[in-house]
Image: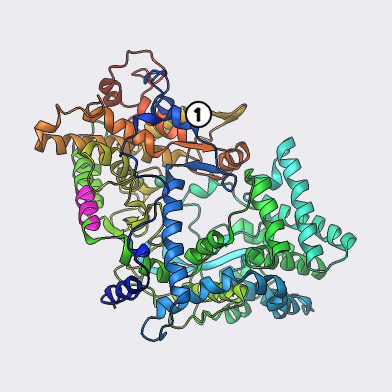
Amino acid sequence: MKSFIPIIISIFCAFNLRAATPPQTEQNPPPLDPKNMDTSIKPGDDFFRYANGTWIKRTEIPPEYSRWGAFNELIERNNDALRVIAEQASKTQVDPKLAPEIQKVGDYYASGIDEKTIDALRTKPLAEEFQRIDAIKDRAALLKAIAHLHTIGVGAFFEFGSGQDAKDSSRDIAQAVQGGLGMPDRDYYTKQDADMKQKREKYVAHVTKMLTLLGEPADKAAEDAKKILALETKLAEASRTRVQLRDPIKNYNKMGVRQLQDVTPDWNWSDYFKTIDLVESGDVNVQQPEFFKAANDLFRSTSLDDWKAYLRWHLINATAPTLSKDFVDEDFNFRERILRGTQQIKPRWKRVILSEDNDIGEALGKLYVGFYFPPEAKARALELVNNLKEALADRIKTLEWMDEPTKQEALKKLAAFTVKIGYPDKWLDYSLLQIDRGPFVLNALRANEFEADRDIKKIGKPVDRTDWGMTPPTVNAYYNSNMNEIVFPAGILQPPFFYAKADDAVNYGAIGAVIGHEMTHGFDDQGRQFDAKGNLRDWWTPKSAEEFEKRSAAIVQQFNEYEALPGLHVNGELTQGENIADIGGVKLAYAALQKALDKHPEERAKKIDGFTPEQRFFLSFAAIWRQKIRDEDQKMRLTTDPHSPAQFRVNGPLSDLPEFQKAYGIPDGSPMVRSADKRVNIW
Ligand SMILES: [Zn+2]
């Protein structure tokens, strides 16, 4: 299979040389651009603005974005690259047997870009799906309809799928999870402040409009929308908060099917399993049992007509972006304009690419890495990962607050990290997935169906360790605690995170800090509860655990103090794990840079643009987080995003680091220097 990539390259190169060179949105700026800085601000007062201030003044968030920064610039470049690939594939005649990815990527793109057909068809391709909902006559049929929606990727009522058994990570088991909401979080339903009340009013107006577009008379649609909000509010009230969901022990409630049946006596799980084609369920982890108890009452007591309205809404909500312009525009209006403040919808090609990356990302990604991810990049990234691993091992060995037995376990865990770089060793086999020239919405639904089926088929089986949770072009990275693995897709291993030719200081400050961040997740307040094998098991002595908790509580307090918008503070509990990872990441990357400089002492004295390597390291760290964000998006993220706002991801960790204070010779008592008794330092 691997030899397939060079064949694809030759097909493309024959067509279009443009595909061989990455398109760029900027004229190759230097790795660190002093023109972005604002030197009228002292580094010790506000380093985020010192490093990025002129960029912030100069930059307008593009109308089609709710935030804009270094990440987005790279995502734009990747999108341009993916567009070239998809367009070329759509114009290439291939034998699907010889080049299945090209056929699928090309046909998917062609179906999505064909606006005329999409607009003419409106919801016609979904007729059968809506009929299925209309035909519900009793509770058994209702359950079947919900189960069917789950098989096509519509998350109505609750979530059900596979996941590793947290206490036996070698196997996948069934997982039942709270869900069923149309707004981003339970807080949108339960909070009583003016802003959330207004969001709810707008949500009802949005649902009304969507149901009207489906052909319901306006007054009936308005009534249904209110009932949908009422039903979802009850689901929200029974749901755990995002902070509560961060507790892996509370989310572990494995039970046999009989016990599961007792939780929800009013629906028959074996009927549900039959519809989703789950032959042998085995034990099920009911992550939030109290949610399912409440769901059972709603299942029984809510009228069938209200349920039908709710299911129609969730079906149209899930498919709107792939339907005609009226649905697309209304969906954008709520999801982007109202919730995030975005001014303008993205051009169609970009929306199709994003949806293609989501739906058949490993087919598109396989073509992408053939062009944009040279083997040298993988080797260089692996070298950086190993250097960071060494830095973390050194750090664990010398930690003043951790005792010896806990250190031994921590080192074992670190040594057992699986590292995945660039793209999967084993690509997903899409041969059973039919992708054709349209209708677009059916391509999307079949892709969902393929993915849902693949997910359900994992239940009861040994874990497939070759699986990836992100697609290759993704500008992101992750740590997975059950796999005990760190994963860096090809998409992020590029400027401004990673430069093949830049000085070490710049690379360690950017991708080095990202790598350190993901590694630290293995030891944050959640990750530390999993052992080397990825099992939920307490390997800490009580004394070391207590020391850890003292320090993590200080981080919660530090970030609780940050005010992102007037009157709106960061939620230190929600962002705890990410903040621990941010602080650990930059600290470890700095230590790794020191090791690299030890090997090349001549580099130490070298200044570039007047900055020492240490100073450039911190400038590079601040540069990757340069960002502007619309207030509405910031508000949403304060409720839903486990990451802190960009300025605090820079100024928070750096104000805890003596290394930073020293690099810039900042006097004690400066805003960027927390006093010694307040400095937090875990990893
Ligand atoms: Zn993270």
Q: Position of residue 518 (x, y in %)?
A: 34, 47
Task: Please give the name of the residue rendered at 11% of the width and 34% of the height, measured from the top-left corner.
Answer: 598
The answer, for residue 8, to whether it is visible in the render is: yes
Characterize the local packing of mark 1: few (<14), some (14-19) or many (20 or more) Cα atoms within 10 angstroms: few
Task: Please give the name of the residue rendered at 53% of the width and 35% of the height, measured from the top-left corner.
Answer: 571
Q: How many marks?
A: 1
Task: Please give the name of the residue rendered at 26% of the width and 51% of the height, measured from the top-left corner.
Answer: 413
Q: Nearer the viewer, residue 312 or 140?
A: 312
Which stretch did the figure color magenta? Answer: 377-386
Q: Which residue is denoted by mark 1 in the rendering?
A: 57
The answer, for residue 459, to whether it is visible in the render is: no
In screen coordinates, is 121 left or right of 633? Answer: right
Q: Nearer the viewer, residue 383 or 467?
A: 383
At label 1, the amino acid type is Lys
In screen coordinates, is 61 left or right of 39? Answer: right
Quarter placement of the N terminus: bottom left
In reply to whether residue 380 is colored magenta, the answer given is: yes
Q: Position of residue 143 (x, y in %)?
A: 68, 74
Q: Position of residue 433 (x, y in %)?
A: 49, 80
In reply to whether residue 184 is colored magenta, the answer given is: no
Q: Nearer the viewer, residue 154 or 291?
A: 154
Q: Position of residue 524 (x, y in %)?
A: 37, 43
Q: Name the magenta segment's main secondary structure.
A: helix
Q: Nearer the viewer, residue 175 or 651?
A: 651
Quarter placement of the C terminus: top left
Vertical arrangement, residue 131 with respect to residue 643, above or below: below
Vertical arrangement, residue 121 with respect to residue 591, above or below: below
Q: Secondary structure at mark 1?
A: helix
In screen coordinates, is 557 left or right of 662? Answer: right
